[in-house]
Image (tube, rainbow, N blue to C red):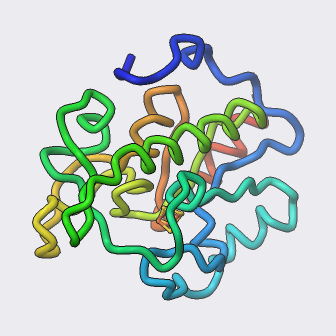
Amino acid sequence: MMAGTDPSDSNPAPGMGAPGKILVSACLLGANVRYNAIPCGAVAPILAQWLGEGRVVPVCPEVAGGLPTPRPAAEISGGDGRRVWLGQARVMTTAGDDVSRAFQAGAQAALALVRSHGIRIAVLKARSPSCGNAQIYDGSFSATRIDGMGVTAALLAEHGVAVFNEDELEQADALLRRLERG
Ligand code: SF4
């Protein structure tokens, strides 16, 4: 259990309803929520299909945590999202502001959506300090990547959500269909 999380959050997510919902980074759906207010590009076909099936629950954890768009770029200093929850790393902006609390509030908002919709799968934007599921930047603002998860991805994974990124849509869709077959 990560520090700063409610023990009751450790309950397993309920079973997937019909249709099963999927949490998706809002920026992957065309929402103007990125730190630099530059769109991510076209919505991927699998995401468009999920939208048509009524499965998509969008979230931007940073905006949900109270940050504006645009906002200063931020990276995790001292480790990855797991270490932020343990109080061993911080999310810092290019201006030197510690925005860890806003990032954690946004992650908790994402977890609340997961719990209320019985979500077991998330597709989150790669390499974001909130949403990255496998790699993030190292906190030096030098475009250097390290292995690790963002703050939201780490919290969701801790609570049993399978977290994919936009380059792993086929795997996410395969898991979705498997879960729905039971
Ligand atoms: Fe918001 Fe995550 Fe997209 Fe960043 S990567 S804009 S936190 S949804």
Residue in the image at 23% along x and 53% along y: 76
Say above or below: 48 vs 36: above
Q: Nearer the viewer, residue 16 or 102?
A: 102
Quadrant where the C terminus is found in the figure: top right
Asked whether, in this view, residue 63 is left or right of residue 70, the answer is: right
Q: Position of residue 29 (x, y in %)?
A: 66, 73
Q: Is residue 171 visible?
A: no
Residue in the image at 49% along x and 75% along y: 34
Asked whether, in this view, residue 23 is left or right of residue 136, the answer is: right
Quadrant where the N terminus is found in the figure: top left
Asked whether, in this view, residue 10 is left or right of residue 50, the answer is: left
Q: Position of residue 128 (x, y in %)?
A: 37, 62
Q: Position of residue 57 (x, y in %)?
A: 74, 53
Say above or below: 11 vs 23: above
In the rendered picture of this protein, how many numbered marks are placed on residues? 0
Q: Is residue 95 visible?
A: yes
Q: Nearer the viewer, residue 180 or 100?
A: 100
Q: Nearer the viewer, residue 39 or 118?
A: 39
Q: Position of residue 65 (x, y in %)?
A: 54, 52
Residue in the image at 27% along x and 27% along y: 86
Residue in the image at 86% along x and 67% along y: 52
Asked whether, in this view, residue 67 is left or right of residue 117, the answer is: left
Answer with the quarter of the image where residue 130 lies.
Answer: bottom left
Answer with the quarter of the image where residue 3 lies.
Answer: top left
Q: Nearer the viewer, residue 177 or 51?
A: 51
